[in-house]
Image: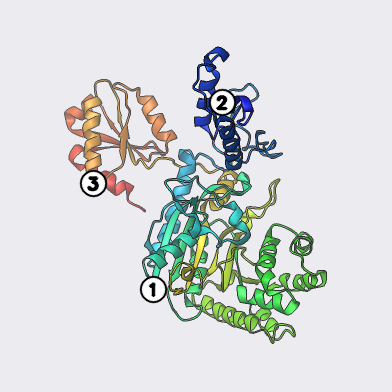
Amino acid sequence: MALLASGALPQNPPHTLPSLQRWLAHMSSFSPSETKDFPPHSLSCKMAEELSQLVHKSIKMTPESLKPDKPSQGSKGGEHSKGKSGKFTLKTPKGTRDYGPTEMAVRRQVFDIIYSVFHMHGAVEIETPVFELKEVLTGKYGEDSKLIYDLEDQGGEILSMRYDLTVPFARYVAMNKITNIKRYHVARVYRRDNPAMTRGRYREFYQCDFDIAGQYDAMIPDAECVQLVHQVLSKLNLGDFTIKINHRKILDGVFGSCGVPAEKFRPICSAVDKLDKSPWEEVRKEMVEEKGLNESVADLIGDYVKFSGREELIDRLKSDERLENSADAQAGLNDLSLLFQYCKSLGCDDHVVFDMGLARGLDYYTGVIYEAVLMAGQNRGEEGSVGSVAGGGRYDGLVGMFDPKKKTVPCVGVSFGIERLFTIQEQKQRAENQKLRSTQTEVFVAAACKGMVHERLKLIQLLHEAGIKAESSYKNNPKLLNQLQYAEDSQIPLVVLIGESEVEAGVVKIREVTTREEATVKREELVATLKQRLAPK
């Protein structure tokens, strides 16, 4: 009670200290007369003072920290889960969403195409934990490190949710002493980003990664990654697209030739990376006011990052008066020249553009970098364009960060943002008024009269044994019109129809749902007939 009376502990401790709350509630339940019977303790005041210091140090209680967090202005998904009436509001967390059957059908289409291309290139699949040791992720993402979700201490390990699939892959390669692998990984990642749902930017989202690790000849694996992006986007058929490429060594050469101090290369690179979202004036302002770059140096950089072209731009920059003496810039330009040649041989150069404004903000990139942009996703609404749908590059030093002997394994890879692709796919289908099937059922078994439930179930079993996707009504005596309407609404192509006369004759009727044409076949010929009709034409 001396602690309580001394004011050393708050009357309303934070919810993160439940034990303290219970202790205070318990002690407060005693009356003043009852507290007089407590055994005396000469050190109570000293204990109160020391405990107060300990608690204040642990929870850092300031007047501001005891106030409830204020939601950011204009945020729709970040409000507290209790409304004005104090009642709990049922919703998904900010930056996340549910996917219903129709949306999942769209996602499955996109996933299937990406998987098929990964398999076509001979990649093997791996899986890593959804969270990693915080130390694994720290120092790999530059300014984006602030977007990592940290977890509370669990059993002595400090953990964080994975930010991407690349760093866990590098950790996997180093830990298992792998010297070469071509792998893909499709999984969720987590970022404390400011979400923009209509643009496909979430806090929880899928990435589909393809990476090649190993010591190989220059630009051959890099060209395969560009080809893979070209194949995926072509198969998705979402309209015209551009694959932008650049090279970190070219950027470093430009920065050095323009007078950027070496220690500011990465911060300035991070600023350039925002050119796809912000005009040059805003990027220049960040360089000068936030990064401390000289205005004249920023203007020189501005002249270069606006360049875009193909092989002719590479040739022009090779003889540029500032870059011709830069070893980094010349090495990067030679790499891109070779990359264009390989892309031509692979038939994927028609969508490739050399864009000097492409920077990729993550610190671990060391060579070629690329991003793919769909033209269909660049219509700017209230929240702006969808942005890039795929991105990646070369990161030769990342694996060595995890190896005790700093042994490096060169790597290059690409990552697809499934949510952004899905957002554009949704927009396309709404514009074309497309209706997607959310079920894969091929046959609906229906009855024309009452008392057919057992006969329907026998047919269902027969079709399932034959590998045909089939379903039926869960009612004993469903109305025929309701059964046919369900098959039509669900876009199930075929209906197998039975009645008393069909059972007696040992036949069934097969009905085409779209044309409503019917044909009678013998029961023993049913499976073969259905498979013939369901076969791709």
Task: Check the image and report above or below for 277 versus 198.
Answer: below
Where is residue 308? Give x, y as percent: 69, 72
Which numbered circle lies on residue 179? 1
Residue marked by disc 3 = 528
Q: Can residue 169 be seen at all in this image of the molecule?
A: yes
Q: CA distance from mark 1 to mark 3?
A: 50 Å
The first of marks 2 and 1 along the sequence is 2
Which of the 4 image quarters holds residue 265? Answer: bottom right
Q: Nearer the viewer, mark 2 or mark 3?
A: 2
Task: Decide which of 513, 225 is in the foreground and name it.
Answer: 225
Q: Amino acid at mark 2?
A: Phe
Q: Are marks 2 and 3 in contact (CB under 8 Å)?
A: no
Going from N to C along the chain, the mark reached first, 2 or 3, is 2
The answer to which image quadrant residue 287 occupies is bottom right
The x and y percentages for residue 220 are 48, 77
Is 348 located above or below residue 197 in the figure? below
Dot 1 or dot 3, earlier in sequence: 1
Q: Which numbered mark, 1 or 3, is in the foreground of this view?
A: 1
Determine the secondary structure under disc 1: loop
In the rendered structure, the answer to whether residue 141 lies left or right of residue 105 reads right
Location of residue 188 in the rendering, given as x and y in whole percent from the top left corner = 47, 50
